[in-house]
Amino acid sequence: MGLQVVRNVATSLAVTAAEAKLYMKTNYGTDADEDNIVEELIYSAQRFLEDMGGFSIASSTWKAWSDRPCDLREFIIPMQPIISIQYVYRIDDIGTETALTLNTDYYKKGLTDLTLFFSADSSDGVPRGGNVANYYPIRVEYTAGHATVPDDLKIAVMTLVAENYINRKDTTMTGIQIVPHTAIQKTAGYCRQRIF
């Protein structure tokens, strides 16, 4: 499965550079270079927590697709919670995308943790039943995350930003926890998968 985020940095980051600087108790004035470093660390920390936990922190547009035909006619959408689904496409053998219609070609199960189920026969008359090889790959464009980022997720991002701002080198020693305990604790209730 492939996954791509289409992020507007100005509106889809969990915290601002000013919030992160205040959290870190850093006062370097109006140095634009340092602000850029902090913003890059925010983006990196947020994406790391999202990838590791399988959830989207701030409202962002995502594109997910199957690299092969959907097994069992279902597609589990990664990066929850889902705010809305914009498009669902079926991709045929030559790469042509056809938009699918909700409640005709596919159905949703769940409120914010969604799985899509596809009809055995679609409106174009192409059979989908029986053989998994008859199913086409799927691409979904959707919005996931929190319209207002919860405080505990903001703290998790800022904790990771502070750690990476202070320790700007790779750590390879054994026995050192790479992700601060506070970040793990604050994201625990949101994670779809436990890999920390």
Image: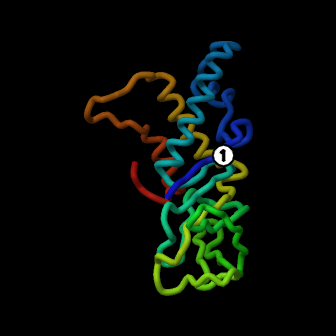
Q: Nearer the viewer, residue 56 or 185?
A: 56
What is the count of numbered marks?
1
Quarter holding residue 141: bottom right
Is residue 25 toward the left or the right of residue 30 in the image?
A: left
- Residue at 55%, 42% (x, y): give it: 47
**Of the pair 182 and 131, the residue shown nearer to us:** 131
| 164 with respect to 32 (left or right) | left
Crowdedness near tag 1: few (<14), some (14–19) or many (≥20) residues, C-alpha within 10 Å: few
Q: Which of 104/145 is in front? A: 104
Q: How is the image coloured?
A: rainbow
Residue 9 drawn at (x, y percent):
69, 37
Residue for point 52% across, 49% down: 187
Q: Position of residue 12 (x, y in %)?
A: 69, 43
Local secondary structure at mark 1: strand
Question: Does 173 sit above or below residue 26?
Answer: below
Q: Is residue 26 visible?
A: yes
What's the amino acid at mark 1?
Val
- The answer to whether residue 113 is seen in the rendering is no
Please give the residue where the numbered disc 1 appears in the rendered image.
6
Task: Please give the name of the residue rendered at 61% of the width and 41% of the height, measured from the top-left corner.
Answer: 154
Q: Position of residue 177 (x, y in %)?
A: 35, 37
Question: Residue 36: which quarter of the image?
Answer: top right
Q: Please tell me which residue is depicted at 51% across the width and 71% down the height of the picture.
A: 70
Vertical position of residue 131 compared to residue 6: above or below: below
Vertical arrangement, residue 114 with respect to residue 55, above or below: below
Image spot of residue 145 (x, y percent): 65, 53
Q: Residue furthest front?
A: 94
